[in-house]
Structures are given as structure tokens and as C-alpha cells.
Amino acid sequence: MKFKRLLSVLLSVILLVSCFTGIGVASVATEDGESLTVIGASIRISGVQGLRFVGEISKENVLITGEDANFGFILIPQTMIGKNEKITVETAGVRAVPAKKLLTETEEYCQFSAVLTEIPAEFYGSDIVARVYFRQGEAYTYSTQISRSIKTVAELILSAEKPTDQELSVARQVMAAYEAVGTDILVNAEDIWNLKVKTPTVVEDFSLAPNEFYLKVENEQPIIGVFNQSIDLAVNSANAFWKEHKSELEEGYFQKSNFVIKPVSYTELTASDPKILVYGGTDKNALLYTTDDEITFRFSCYSGETLVSVPYIKYEIYNEATGMTSRGYVDASSGTATVTVSATGKVGAVYVDASACDASKNKITENITTIDGYHFRGSAIVDSQSITMSVETPSDFDNFWNTQKTALYSSPIEIIEMVEKQSGKSGFKLFYVELKCNVYSGETDGIVSGYLTYPISASSSSKINLRVAFKGYSFSASSPSYNAGAATFSVCAHSIDCELAISDSSYLSEQEKKNTIFDKTANSNRETAYFRGMIMRDLQAARFMMEYFGEKGIGDGKGKGFWNGTNFIASGGSQGAFQAIAVAALDENITYLNVSIPWMCDVKAANGRRKSDFIMDYTSALEYYDTTSFAHLITCKTRVSFSLGDATAPVSGVIAFYNALTCEKTLVASQNASHSAWLQPTEYELREASQH
């Protein structure tokens, strides 16, 4: 299980989902890297004071999280550098904070944070300089840097137009404490890094109840375990327990305790209070249940830091192992509730949808956050390593696609047009590209279309990565994507003129009549299926990138030799993930595959599997386009992220795809997330080495 951690130093630099109050700090535009952003800074609303920086990075970058994360923050006290000095990882005294954990993610971006905790009042006025970094090999790309102190953020709260009462109270406390120590105290900035105490590491342990914690000592390190580290009350209660008992600590010490949570009725909340979030979780890692395990789903209702009492939680559970659905209500007047699913001895996913209800058992809708109409959507997986595709991949699958590739590659690429446009990002060139690509019998006007970007600085002596990027389902033009150090072709899923589709809605409407993705007749024949043309166009786009930026230098020859010869990335989300996966499977030049919420995994969903809520009628011909069928052909490093509450890309299908991969692979699952919403997610991660 991958836990959120607090490093055991005063002013620890950490990555976690903490309950800080967000301050209205304007987004800072990227400087050296167009896809990197420092969003701003915030401070704690309760408990020990701290300063959090939040960053954002495009998922078009090859992102690695965990212990060997290749992106994160660099931090340093302002007084340790020159007035206008730009910090890098090589700056003396700088601290690099890898992104071991994400805050949130969408199809396009990931957000993460770096936090300084337990800052004493003497340091409230000390500015900390923060900058996002991205590492690729030995090269680093950086965002613009910002400088903030706890005092600065508090002043922003006090000057804001409509701060909440809680924000005002915290800001005033900060300013009072700052003024009490005196503004004339000279602080040696290096003390910020050098003062150390033996503070506990804090981890999440889902076997605990929401109001429980433990304190233990392993390898001379005190460790606090809590159910949800996002709630300061849990961490602060455990810290108080540690301070009371730290004289007793020795190797092997273990003590479990609890704290009192006093819920507030949902009827007492006001419009200015944060929306209620029904936070859901399981009593252990959601990916690691065995066939002998009971599964306990836990729910808790919070409005910001406040535990909220609601009369009932209504739940609906679907168990793939039994094919049975159960429904009911549980008392949530304490602000928390649990539902236990008995062990079945069988493999599969157990899905749960839950909503907060009033005394009449009607769903509460006012001032409460929803995910796809529910207040919580999630799941747990029983024996995840045994989940496979519910039908066999066609025996001639490989031969079919080899035949398609041979036909496509038998003719040279014909560039219909490559027109330079006004770039939406400084430092980049932008082109609209159309390539000839007739796929179906009798087709004469088939095209690949999309937008190509690359850095102005790219040359045969300043080489770059290559990317093909695909977006989720829609009948529309593609849009440009700008990525530092890379040429990116954002490929349209359809054979349409993107420029005309943007400017002429009647043209787009006429073209959409040709969209047969959901046409059962077309999907009954693997040769006429709409997905065949889509994948062939995607392969042509990847081929174009290789030949335009490689040594062939096709077209105008202006991109010849720009590719570094080592990094070619395919990425996308939802339908875009399906496309990227097919390209990575069929084009051996792809070196990294990064996909999220992949659609079309195990399209038949037989034997009780939950079927996608957005899928075409099943035909056997669709097995040639099943995302999972492509997995065995992928040899490049692969990262797959998905949501445990996703009804459009159901979890069993995604896990079946992951299990079918034989390459080096990482799977990241998010609880409290669906196909389109990520609400304070808890992440679980699996990694495996290549089997080749």
C-alpha cells in the first residue's frame, strides 16, 4: 500500500492531500516549461501551522510518481539566494521534493503539492521560494518561481473581498503570533533546514475507523497511523497523544487510541460553508482483497474540516462475483457509516454507490458534492491479479492487424497540407496538418488531421522527443497541445477537416452523419468498423512524426533530424487512451505509453462483469478493437491510471488490460473518483517489471 508520509524533520517537506484553506493567489504562467505551473500557496486552517505550495503539470509529460518521481517542487528560503536568482536543482541549499503523491488529476493535468509543516511563529515572515521541476534523463525543465511566507498568505486573506470567518480567524492568529515575536528578529535562513526534531511519520491505514489512530515505533522512527490524513483533527489528536507518551517510546512500541468527533447536523450548515463531501474508503488497499476477505466500505461526511451528521447513507452494491445487487440504508447520524460485504470466494469487483439522505430517506442535494449523480462512487477488487478478459482474443488478431499495417505502410505518406498557424504559446511553432489516409474500400477522401507543435529551439543539434496525443470521445476537431522539449501531434479521431469543423458548424454536422461508432451493422464486420479507420489514421500520424522529424525528413525537410531517437510517447484519456494503446501495440517505435481511464476494455463484459454505461452494442467483430486485446503486443514502459468509481471504463476491464500487459508497467487507482470527477482521491498503486 502506498501511503502519504510526513518526513521526520521540523519544517518537513512532504507531498500529501492536506486540509489547507485555499487562498486567492493568481496562477503563475510557466517560464521555461510551458506545461509546468505553480498555482499558488495556502496555509493550514487548524492545528500546527504550515505552508503549502500547489503545482500543476501536463500529463503529456512522461510522469513518474512514487519514490522515483521525475517531477515535483524545489524549495529554498529567499535569504539563501540572490534577489533575482532563479533556482535549480543545483542551487546550493535547495531542497527537491519529488511528487510521490498526486492531489488530483484530470485527463490533461496532474496537481501535486509540497508542504512545510510545524513552522514556528519566528519563521512566519520567512519567504520560501518554490518552483516546479520536471526531469527527463539528465535534463530539467522548470516553471516560473514564486516566493511566499505564512505571513504573506495571511495578509492576502485579510485583504480578500469575501474571506470566510474561519479564514479570517486563522489569518488574525497568524498575524498576532508573528507580531508577538517581533519583526526585528534576524533569522538565519539555514535554520529552516537545519532545526530538526524526532517527529512522527504519518501514514494512512484504512484498517482504522475514521476516529481511530495508533502510535508505534519501527526502526527507531515513531509512526502515527490514521484513517484519513486529510482531516487535521485526526493528525492533531495523534500528535497530542505522541507528545504525551513520547517519553515511553522504544523500539516495538504500539498503542492504539481514538479521538472524539462531534458532528454538526447538515441542517446547521450555511451557504458560505464548504460543500459536504461524502468521503468513501475501504478497510484495506482496495486492490488487494483476497477471496477469503470481507470488504468493509466506510463513509464519512465532511464540510471542510467539519464532520457532518446526516440521518442516513443510502447504498447500492453490485458484486460481480455473484451478479447480485443489494440496496439499503445505514445510520449516519454520527457522521460516519460502514457497510460490510461478505466474502464470496470468487474473483471480481465489488462496486458501491452511496448518497446522503434526510430523515425521510430522500437524497440530500443542497450544498453537497456529487459524482455522476451520487455522493460517492467506488469499488474494491477481489483477487485483482486473477482478473482477465471475459472472452478470448480472436486467434487471428495479430495477423489481422499485421495485414492492416502492411497495407498502410505500402504507400508513402502524402502530406496534403502543413500550414503554420499563430501559436498559442510563446516559444513554440504551431501547424495544422492533413495527411492522405484512405482506409475503407472505395474511400478516396480519407484524411488524418490535427495540430502539430514543437519548440522553436528544436534543431538537428537540439533534439526533441516525439508525442502523439489523443483526446476523449467527441465528434469535434482536435486542439493543440504544447509540451516542453517535444513535438506533439494532437490527432483528430475522425477523418474531418479540423479547420473547417471549427469555423463551420454545418460542415461538422454533415460529417457527424458519417460517424458509425455506435452503428451495430458497421460494427458487425471488422473491415467496416469505424474504429478500424480511427486506428489506421492514428498509426499514420505516428508514422508521419517518425518520418518528418527523423532522418527521412519528409515534406519540406524542415524537421529532419530533430528527433532524439530515444523517446516517442503515446498518450490519451478515455477513447484517447484506447487510441494510444492501439498505437503503442502496433508501432514498435513508441517508447512510453501514458493513459488514463481507458475505454473499450473487455467490451463484452461477460460473466457478470459490470458493463460500461457508454458503449456500443456488442458484436464479435469488436473483439478486434477491444483495448485489452492489444495489451500482449505492447513492449514499451506503460502507466495506466483509472478511477475505482468509473462506470464508463469499469474497473474489471481496466485491470484485465493491466494484467494482460507483459511490459514494465504501473497501475494507479483512485478511490472517490469517476470517469469525469476526482474528489479528494485516495490512490493505490501497483508496479511490475517487464516480462520480456
Image: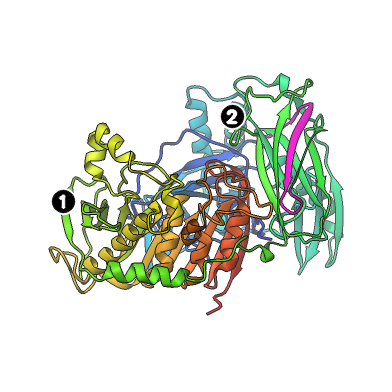
Distance Cα–Cα, label 2 vs label 1 = 51 Å
Q: What residue would you read off at disc 2?
A: 167
Q: Which residues are magenta?
A: 305-323
The one nearer the camera, 350 or 56, is 350
Element assignment for label 2: helix
Which amino acid is tagged 2? Glu
Position in image of residue 382 (x %, y %): 73, 58
Tell whether 166 sits left or right of 256.
Answer: left
Q: Is residue 536 above or below residue 473?
A: below
Element assignment for label 1: strand
Magenta segment includes 553: no
Q: Residue furthest bottom?
A: 692
The one nearer the camera, 553 or 600, is 600
Quadrant of the image containing the N terminus: bottom right
Between label 2 and label 1, give the one nearer the viewer: 1
Q: What residue would you read off at disc 1?
A: 419
Q: Residues within 10 Å of mark 1 (few under 14, many from 20)?
A: few
How many numbered callouts?
Answer: 2
Which disc is residue 26 wearing?
A: none
